[in-house]
Image: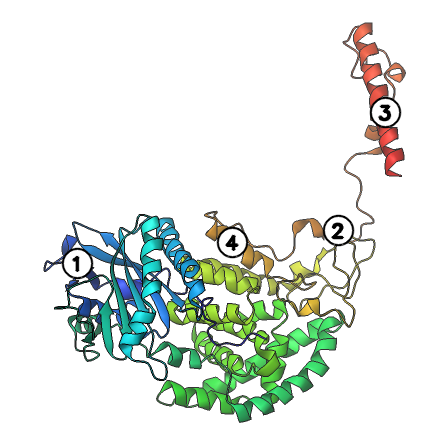
Amino acid sequence: MTNHDEAAGCSDIGDRGGSSRHDGETTAHCGHGPSGPQGEPQVTLRTPAELADALPYLLGYRPEDSIVLVALHDRERRGRFGGRARLGIPAHPADWPSVAEQLARGLVIGSERRGAPPESMVAYLVQEPASGETGRDVMERLRPLAQSLRTACGSLDVPVVEALCLSDGRFWSYCCPSPVCCPPEGQPMGVPGTSVLAAAATYAGLQVRGSLKEFRARLSPCGTETARVQEAALDSASRALVPRILDGDSRADVAADTLALAERVMARLGAAPPVPGTEEADRRDDVLLAHDEAAALILGLQDRTTRDRAAEWMEGAEAAVALRLWRSLARRCVGPYGEHAAAPLTLAGWVAWSTGDELEAREAFAMALGADPDYLFARLLHQACNEGLDPETVRRCLRTERADRAEPNETAAMTPRSSTTPTSDTSAGSALDASTPSPLDPPTPSPLDLSALDPSAPSAHDTSGSCQAAVQERLEGVEPSAPQRVPARRLRRVRPGSGPRPSRRSSGTFDARRRKPNDTPAGDGPHRDRSPRAVEGADSRLRARRGLGRRAGEEAT
């Protein structure tokens, strides 16, 4: 069972695209000079010490056990910071060359997609000493990894101009051979917040939001004692809800109950008085959410349609409360239910991205993929966020879904092409009733078939395909088409008071097409202006086509 902790060597590349909030108003450069082109504000970093101090401001948090690559774009012999990429340091040195190649290639390709290929790189290795180690021991142990990074970047014609190791409050340069400026015992890191870059970031309104461990703690499972109680509640909810979700007749009822419960909990969270500090705020939210409520919500969100309906709480006043709820649910996915966290983590990342917090969005998407690597919605949103796409594409799709459900008359007029007229189900946002069999619908799963809970599997009530398709089209550079909740071929208009839909071709036309040319009256029909030889040739071709048609029909039979 995959947990939420970062797996060495296969964690997120969540900072690949960078963020305009970190390199927008205040632009950091490597080089000399008081001002940049067009008079934009500029901070000049001249020494390895200043580069080491700049790392938390480039990412927005203090990384731990991380490989970080920062792209530099040459501008009049100045290195302007571009995209950033981060990976966890693999525990096994044998994995270092492949990880270095993956990270370098991902950053270069991502930068090229945005039209800004990097000219060079700055590499960081961040790791605290283990028991009995010193910072210098860490630096020497990670030296082959630094060399792998330099080799991987060099093979892409993007040289590493500086490679630093940060450990135990000191830093070392792998590129500077001079013991004068880079002694073997390393150089001490500056006091946080006292550098020129820190002052410029404060002036620009940027801040470092703690360490990566503190950041992920808000989305990680709760403590041991609480975990046992929550696991028991999840077991009980699973026995009660999973059979109902697998049953097509009651699946829509479970979706409606889940969304109604989520709205009640959000109203309760919104009415709670604010408290200072993130840890206190998270504890307050955990107290306001009962174990049985959390279990019912976690199980209910495993359905794709329910999850996408919940994703509509993405803007305005309801977005902040929804984000608090998704964080709290992610902390309740304990024990064997760790994979269930993919849904609330993806929702948390989506709301964070929709409201402009790309940093939390990337980490939440990465943790969702850590819980379930095959979770398609998280993978698409993660890639879209990393590549700097506008979340308005997904917001527009979800707004359309909500508006369509607000038109019950139009929904009731849409029925599947079948000899029967099924009852339309609007409570789950679908124009089809899962309880009515149709040749176009997937078969109802048996009680032992848990694929119905797979977020990537199709659902009879599924409306998320259009949103996922919109994200994928934008990733491929295609303008997304208008979202459709159900494929058009499965729907038709019902004409009140009419019988079966008449054929587009009248019986007279059909008989005329089957009539032999010799039966056509003189001066009429398609052969009236043709010579006898042309008519005879047409008759031969017609007989040949009929013979082929009969043989094909016999083979099909």
Dot 3 surroundings within 10 Å: few (below 14), some, or many (20 or more)?
Answer: few
Q: Amino acid at mark 4?
A: Gln
Mark whose residue sits in front, 1 or 2: 1
Mark whose residue sits in front, 3 or 4: 4
Q: Amino acid at mark 1?
A: Glu
State the image coordinates of residue 271 (x, y, percent, origin top left): 46, 88
Q: Which residue is mark 4?
A: 472
Q: Amino acid at mark 3?
A: Arg
- Earlier in the chain: of badge 4 and badge 2, it is 4
The answer to whether marks 4 and 1 mark residues whose Cβ atoms lie closer than 8 Å is: no
Is residue 391 among what the camera can see?
Answer: no
State the image coordinates of residue 45 (x, y, percent, origin top left): 16, 64
State the image coordinates of residue 336 (x, y, percent, origin top left): 61, 80
- Earlier in the chain: of badge 1 and badge 2, it is 1
Of 394 and 11, the residue lying toward us = 11
Q: Which residue is mark 1?
A: 40
Give the mark count. 4
SS for dot 2: loop
Instruction: State the separation of the CA atoms marked 4 and 1.
Output: 35 Å
Task: Give the quarter of the figure containing the C terminus.
Answer: top right
Q: Which residue is mark 2?
A: 495
For residue 546, which numbered disc appears in the image?
3
Q: In the rendered view, would you say 163 is above or below 469? A: below
Instruction: State the separation of the CA atoms marked 4 and 2.
Output: 36 Å
- Earlier in the chain: of badge 4 and badge 1, it is 1
